[in-house]
Image (spheres, helix red, strand yellow):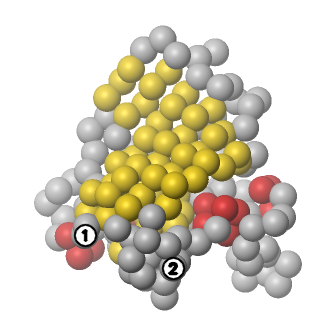
Amino acid sequence: MDRKEVSALVNMRGVKGYFLFRQDSPFEVTKLRVNLTNLGSRVGPYHIHHFPTPPMRSPPQTTCSNDNVGGHWNPFGMDTKDPTYPSGPGSTHDRYEVGDLSARHGSLEGKAVMEAVFTDFNLPLFGQNSIVGRSVVIHRPDGTRFLCGLWMSMRTRHRLSIWTGTCR
């Protein structure tokens, strides 16, 4: 089975960078590399959301709306309102929604630049619960949606497929 690598580019509202996800097989961990600049005090949590971003004809202010990208990718139905749901990093990754990246790996809040590599045990690039083809949403510190984008490419060990998408 070929290794999978997917990326989402961010170039919107002055924020630039990428998210790069790599998983060698369905039985291996996923490596997540985050490289974002010019964050200022404008951003907070970040997540994988259920649906891809819509075509360019959507008004920019609604691109990241719930109607377009849905909520956090949560194929196992984790209840974030449950008092035992982890409020930040430190629990095993199976205790979080699959898409809740900032709860597992820390918020972007207060950072001007984010350059980090994380190992994630519950972020599949293979199978029915895969995050591939969904959207990445960066929220403001108050939780409102600020930026979103779609995977831009998928690379396997032997071939490269280019996906079209937009980051706004």
Across and down, in percent, residue 113 comes to: 45, 64
What residue do we see at 50% from left, 21% from top? 156
Residue at the limit of the structure toward the bottom, as seen here: 142
What's the amino acid at mark 2? Gly
Looking at the image, residue 70 lies above or below residue 160: below
In front: 40, or 157? Answer: 40
Residue with the mark numbered 1: 13
Across and down, in percent, residue 36 comes to: 42, 58
Label 2: element kind? loop
In front: 50, or 115? Answer: 115
Residue with the mark numbered 2: 110
Could you tell me how many numbered marks the image carries? 2
Looking at the image, residue 7 lies above or below residue 110: above
> Which of pointers 1 and 2 lies earlier in the amino acid sequence?
1
Across and down, in percent, residue 167 comes to: 28, 55
Density class for disc 2 (Cα within 10 Å; few <14, some 14-19, many ≥20) is few
- Mark whose residue sits in front, 1 or 2: 2
Q: Return the mark for residue 118.
A: none
What residue do we see at 41% from left, 49% from top? 18
What residue do we see at 39% from left, 77% from top? 40
Looking at the image, residue 66 lies above or below residue 143: above
Q: Does residue 123 appear anywhere in the picture?
A: yes
Density class for disc 1 (Cα within 10 Å; few <14, some 14-19, many ≥20) is few
What's the amino acid at mark 1? Arg
Q: Quick check: 15 left or right of 91?
A: left
What residue do we see at 48% from left, 11% from top? 158
Looking at the image, residue 124 lies above or below residue 66: above
In front: 111, or 167? Answer: 111
Residue at the limit of the structure toward the left, as seen here: 57
Label 1: element kind? loop
Across and down, in percent, residue 49 comes to: 49, 60
